[in-house]
Amino acid sequence: MVGKVTVTEPVDEVVDLVSALIRFDTSNTGELDTTRGEADCARWVAEQLSEVGYDAEYLESGAPGRGNVFARLPGADRSRGALLIHGHLDVVPAEPADWSVHPFSGAVEDGYVWGRGAIDMKDMCGMMIAVARHFKCAGIVPPRDLVFAFVADEEAGGKYGARWLVDNRPDLFDGVTEAIGEVGGFSLTVPRKDGGERRLYLIETAEKGMLWMRLKARGRAGHGSMIHDDNAVTAIAEAVGRLGRHQFPLVVHPAVDEFLTAVAEETGYTFDLDGPDLDGAIAKLGPIARIVGATLRDTANPTMLTAGYKANVIPATAEAVIDCRVVPGRQAAFEREVDEIIGPDITREWITELPSYETEFDGDLVEAMNGALLATDPEARTVPYMLSAGTDAKHFARLGIRCFGFIPLRLPPELDFAALFHGVDERVPAEALQFGTRVLEHFLRNC
Ligand SMILES: [Zn+2]
C-alpha cells in the first residue's frame, strides 16, 4: 500500500530514524551463539523503504538472523554504472554500567542522539533511509541507479555480511561501479598557525590492510620445578615483546601525503617527513592524530596470549595473536620484517587477511562530494585521507567497485570524534545528522 504514507522532509525525519535504529540491540560479539543478529533491525529498515514504494529485498547472509536489506532506485541514465550506498546495521557490544545513558536507548538529549552505533554507523543508515524515502515520495529521479545496502556483521569482518554477499549474491551488485560508506566525510577543525581555525572534510580514499596473525612457539613440556631451556612460554613472550616494541619504517603513501600537504596549506604548519619530530607535528591535529599517525607506518599490536594450564607444568606450545595493519603496497616487505623479528623458531599464520585498499582522489564522484559539501558549508575544503582500520569497502572492492568513505557530518570542533568509535557514551549531534542528510541528498541528486 503506497500513497497513505506522509513523509516529512528528510532532515526532520533523520533524528527519529537514527534513534529508532539504535533501539535495536544489534550487538555483534563475533560469535554466532552470542550474537542475536540484525534481523529485527533489517526487517524494520525494509518496512521503512517498502512503505514508500521500494521493492526492498530482505535476505540473510550465511546464518539465521544475520539480516541485510537491499533496495534499488532506478536513475535517469540506466546505461551508467550504479552507485552503491552502504551501511552496516551491527554494532560492537556495550556495557550499560559504563554509560551516562543506556546504550540502546537512542535517547535524544542535549542536542545529541545517544547510543551504541550513533556514529558507527546507524547515523549513516538513518540518513540513507531519510533520503531514500524522500526521493521515492517526491518522485526525484537520481542521475543513475542508486543501490541502498544495509548489511550485517561488519564489526566481525563481514563473514556473515558483506563478504558473504559478495561471494554468494554478486547479482545484488549488478552494474555497480562506485560506492560510498564509512569512514569519511566528517569535518575536522584544525588550528591555524596565525590563530583561528580551518574546517576540513576528510574523504577516505585508502585503507590499511587488516592482517590478524597467530604466532606459535613450540618447546618441550616439563615440570616447572626443574632447569628447562626449551620453554614455549618464554619463547612466545620474547617474540611478542620484540614485535610489540618494534617501529616499522615511515612510509608516506600518496593519500597521506595529499592529506598532510592540504593541512599544511590551510593551517600554515609544516610536516617535515624527514624531521625529528613528525609525531609532534601531527599531534597538533588533535585526537585525529591517533588515526593519521597510524597511517604513516605499518603497525603490529599484540592483542591475545594463550599458554599453559597449570602453574607447575611447562606447556609444549604457546600462542599469541597480533593485530597487524599494513600500508598499501607494503605487505611483502612487512612479512619479511616480521619474520626477521620473530626468528625461525616461531611459526606464523594469518587468521584474517584483508588486503589494503586505495583509489585516487579525482573524477566526477569526488567532484559531486565536493559540490555537495560546498553547497551546504561554503567554508568547506575536502581532503583525501587513509583510514588506519578496515571497512566493508575491502569486500566490495573485490567486485571492481571503486570505494570511498563518505558519511557527511559537520561536527563541533571540540568533539573527540575518533574516541567515539566503539567508545563509551557514543553519540552524534542532531545538527550533524541534519547537515549530513542535506549533503547526502545534494550528492545523490548530482552523482
Ligand atoms: Zn563501522
Image (cartoon, grey):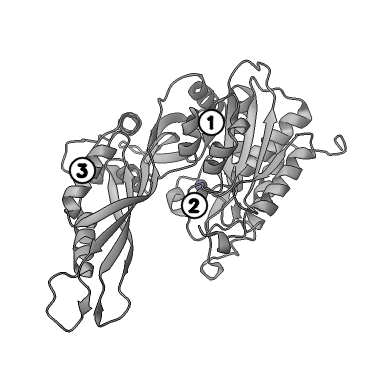
**Pointers 1 and 3 in contact (CB under 8 A)?**
no
Q: Position of residue 344 (x, y in %)?
A: 17, 53
Q: Position of residue 212 (x, y in %)?
A: 36, 51
Q: Quadrant of residue 140?
A: top right
Q: Mark 1 vs mark 3: give the one in front.
A: 3
**Residue located 62% across and 42% down the image:** 150
Q: Secondary structure at mark 3?
A: helix
Which quadrant, please, contains the N terminus? top right
CA–CA distance in space, label 1 to label 2: 21 Å
* Residue 439 appears anywhere in the view: no
Which quadrant, please, contains the C terminus? top right
| Residue receiving disc 3 | 336
Label at residue 156 = 2
Q: From the viewer's perspective, is 47 left or right of 91? A: right
Q: Is residue 305 above or below residue 193?
A: below
* Residue 336 appears anywhere in the view: yes
What amino acid type is highlighted by mark number 1? Ala
CA–CA distance in space, label 1 to label 3: 34 Å
Q: Mark 3 vs mark 2: give the one in front.
A: 3
Q: Secondary structure at mark 2?
A: helix
Q: Secondary structure at mark 1?
A: strand
What amino acid type is highlighted by mark number 2? Ala
CA–CA distance in space, label 3 to label 2: 27 Å
Label whose residue precedes the other's in the sequence (1 or 3): 1
| Residue receiving disc 1 | 179
Q: Nearer the viewer, residue 261 or 335?
A: 335
**Residue located 64% across and 35% down the image:** 148
